[in-house]
Amino acid sequence: MTIRIGINGVGRVGRNLWRIIHTSAPDLTVAAANDTADLSTLAHLLRYDTVRGRFPGTIETGPGALVVDGSPVPVSHEPAPERIDWGSHGVDLVVEATGEFVRGDRARGHLRGGAPLVVITTATPDADVCLMLGVNEQVFHPERHRVVSNSCCSAYCIAAAVSPLLAAYGIVSGTVCLAYSHGSRPGPLLDDDPAGSGAAGPGTPRNLRIARANAINLVPANVPGVRHALERVLPALAGRISATAVRVPVRATSAAALTLRLARPAAAPEVNATLRAAAASLLKPYLEVRDQPLVSADVLGATASCVVDASLTASLGDLVRVVGWYDNEWGYAHRLVDLARYLCSG
């Protein structure tokens, strides 16, 4: 059976997902899409991509549709989820990828439009459930969970590395520093006051670092959402992990440097062996371990959510450092494909 996907928001995540479905997921099809941009803009951005290159097929426009390799895909331009008629397209699942309707109450508008299931492409506190494949998918209950969060790419990378270490050694506490591609959450090219840098309300400090030129600076940024996202899928770590980020001027790929205090000492080779075992079993293909000395460009196009750089693993008694790389767009979009298969398998 072919799984019919609806995409709301043909942006970075939506276009990466569309490419993967077109090239390597024959059991999925994009049945319909919605975006407020006009068809010619959507066609051009799907056809050409600075990071991914040319789309592997023809992209044309037709009446109310994008025509992909000769097959028309209906595209609507509704501004709100509840106004999209997903029911008329017979979709099995809608991917909410706009970045706007990320709270569960807003995303539930897709259900009123006829979508049986909704997957939100970020962490959110009020989805029916937050799932990470290989970590907690067994908690999914099809009758209760109709709006599902696929968490976020950073939390996916961290959880893929942390969950086998938690099971093997126990984790007392830890910190994570993310080197995050600025292209994934664009800030200003030059010093400016972009949306989101201003104060959220009276007495709330302005995020002045994000207002600086993201393309030519290392920009520290607080990411409390990553900690909360991690706690939703690994509740045993609640209150034990903190995270911060530095936006770095690269076009794609990011890294997570984890410093963990384990419940018992473990040498670096033992830690790597534990991660390799997980990568070959429960967490295959979400976790990968490589022995080569990597830089960010080496991970561009990686489909795993976490590529552990084994040569950077270090230990000092019960204190362990693990570094995981991830292509924050491509790997995450592959998890959307995997999650769609899992949710629709029953």
Image (spheres, rainbow, N blue to C red):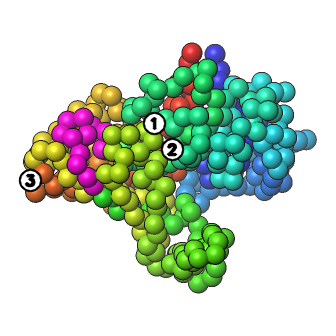
Report the residue at 79% width, 32% height from top: 112
Q: Of label 3 and label 2, which has the lower sequence position?
A: 2
Distance from the alpha carbon under mark 1 to that under mark 3: 30 Å
Mark 1 packing: few (<14 Cα in 10 Å), some, or many (20+)? many
User: Residue 44 vs residue 221: left or right?
Assistant: right
**In-front residue for pair 289/9:** 9
Report the residue at 59% width, 76% height from top: 203
Under mark 3, the amino acid is Gly
Q: Does the residue at mark 3 contact the one at mark 2 (Cβ under 8 Å)?
A: no
Distance from the alpha carbon under mark 3 to that under mark 2: 32 Å
Report the residue at 23% width, 45% height from top: 171
Under mark 2, the amino acid is Ser
Q: Quadrant of residue 256?
A: bottom left
Q: Report the residue marked by disc 3.
A: 317
Q: Report the residue marked by disc 2.
A: 151
Look at the image and give the residue range highlighted in magenta: 161-174
Under mark 1, the amino acid is Met
Mark 3 packing: few (<14 Cα in 10 Å), some, or many (20+)? few
Q: Does the residue at mark 1 contact the one at mark 2 (Cβ under 8 Å)?
A: yes
Quadrant occupied by the N terminus: top right
Quadrant occupied by the C terminus: top right
Q: Secondary structure at mark 1?
A: loop
> x, y (%) of residue 173?
26, 52
Q: Report the residue marked by disc 1.
A: 132
Confirm whether residue 73 shows in the render: no
> x, y (%) of residue 68?
74, 38
Mark 2 packing: few (<14 Cα in 10 Å), some, or many (20+)? many
